[in-house]
């Protein structure tokens, strides 16, 4: 039995979480779901957005499924990522038949280093009008993220890893990152490797996104590039993410609590469902993950979707269609 902490959270977080669990229940996974509270409503009730009890449940679980938190998102999810020491942020972007987007047949996953770079908060005012920020890149964290990217490529049957950096200008920090990626690549003969400067990489991403498969990069570049690829395929309702650590992992949709549509029963459950298939892949349930993803793809292609994707189904109805396609 694997313990999974389930935090539905606020707004549509609750709606997409219950939809997602229905899909998982179509299988017989050896999971024990432990529900926990966090978010705006929890803060109102208990004074804390992320109660100790919730944190404890997360730390006793193999994975966390997270819906959404409203205004307290920073106190909840940013803190959870820190407490659970998740070093890799995964952001896949895929174009779906039947969804308007810039490019067809795009299928890219960004593996972003999540612990260092310019986002460590090492910023100082040297004197009035002069500020500095310190960029930390270590061999250890670079190697860990590079290996993770190659292992993920292998596991998911992906063909190529591309590292993005700016080693021509940031010779020490990006130079180290690039060299470590190149070295790790030699251990993976079965996976193609290339590396580009981040600026050129961004241009190729919009001219020829098909040349990318797995992208591995440092924290800040990864933040920017993962939004860029989300834009290539369009749609918050379809964007999942994962935060992976040595011991723990958190799976959550990219979207928030969407107060404008909360309670109407029309939230698109896809991003949450796709986040749960990232969890299944993490645990090694690759064929089950594929079955769910294919069923979702088919449902979308048939136009049986919530209004954000142009359909006229409610969340529950879309889930029924997905489950039908799983069982076919
Ligand atoms: P929060 O402060 O919790 O992030 P938000 O107002 O920023 O809330 P988001 O959840 O980030 O809202 O969503 C931005 C927009 O995208 C909203 O108009 C929302 O309705 C829409 N949206 C987001 N997720 C979904 C979804 N799963 N299904 C349908 N529409 C969505
Ligand atoms: Mg938002």
Image: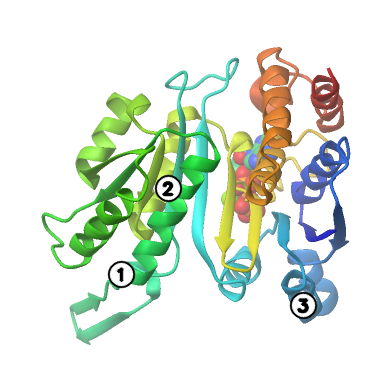
Provide residue 98's location: percent of width, then percent of height. Answer: 60, 15
Q: Are marks 1 and 2 in contact (CB under 8 Å)?
A: no
Note whether 243 is above or below 294 in the view shown: below
Q: CA distance from mark 1 to mark 2?
A: 16 Å
Name the secondary structure under disc 2. Answer: helix
In primary-sequence order, the first of circles 1 and 2 is: 1
Q: Which residue is mark 1?
A: 139
Label 3 CB, ligand 1: below 8 Å?
Answer: no
Dot 3 or dot 1, earlier in sequence: 3
Left or right of 129 on screen, residue 102: right
- Mark 2 touching mark 3, by CB under 8 A? no
Whole-number angstrom distance, CA of label 3 to CA of label 1: 32 Å
Secondary structure under the numbered disc 3 in the rendered image: helix
Which quarter is ligand 1 in?
top right
Which residue is tagged 3? 56
Q: Is residue 26 left or right of residue 260?
A: right
């Amino acid at each position: 039995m694997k313990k999974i902490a389930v935090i539905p959270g606020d707004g549509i977080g609750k709606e997409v979480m219950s939809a997602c669990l229905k899909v998982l229940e179509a299988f017989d996974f050896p999971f024990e779901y432990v529900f926990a509270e966090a978010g705006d409503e929890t803060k109102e009730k208990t004074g804390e957005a992320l109660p100790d009890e919730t944190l404890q449940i997360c730390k006793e679980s193999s994975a966390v499924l997270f819906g959404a938190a409203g205004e307290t998102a920073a106190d909840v999810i940013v803190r959870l990522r820190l407490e659970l020491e998740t070093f890799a942020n995964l952001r896949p972007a895929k174009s779906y038949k039947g969804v308007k987007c810039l490019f067809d047949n795009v299928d890219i996953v960004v593996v972003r280093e999540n612990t260092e770079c310019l986002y460590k908060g090492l910023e100082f005012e040297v004197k009035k009008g002069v500020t500095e920020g310190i960029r930390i890149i270590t061999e250890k964290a670079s190697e860990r993220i590079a290996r993770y990217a190659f292992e993920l490529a292998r596991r998911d049957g992906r063909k190529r890893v591309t590292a993005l950096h700016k080693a021509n200008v940031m010779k020490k920090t990006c130079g180290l990152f690039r060299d470590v990626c190149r070295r790790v690549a030699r251990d993976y003969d079965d996976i193609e490797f290339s590396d580009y400067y981040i600026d050129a990489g961004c241009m190729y991403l919009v001219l020829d996104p098909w040349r990318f498969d797995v992208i591995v990069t440092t924290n800040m570049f990864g933040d920017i590039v993962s939004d860029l690829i989300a834009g290539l395929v369009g749609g918050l309702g379809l964007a999942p993410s994962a935060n992976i650590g040595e011991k723990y992992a958190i799976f959550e949709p990219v979207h928030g609590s969407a107060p404008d549509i909360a309670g109407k029963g029309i939230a698109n459950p896809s991003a949450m469902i796709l986040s749960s298939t990232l969890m299944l892949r993490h645990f090694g349930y690759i064929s089950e993950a594929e079955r769910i993803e294919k069923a979702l793809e088919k449902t979308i292609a048939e136009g049986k979707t919530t209004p954000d994707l142009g359909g006229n189904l409610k969340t529950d109805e879309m889930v029924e269609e997905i489950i039908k396609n799983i069982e076919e």
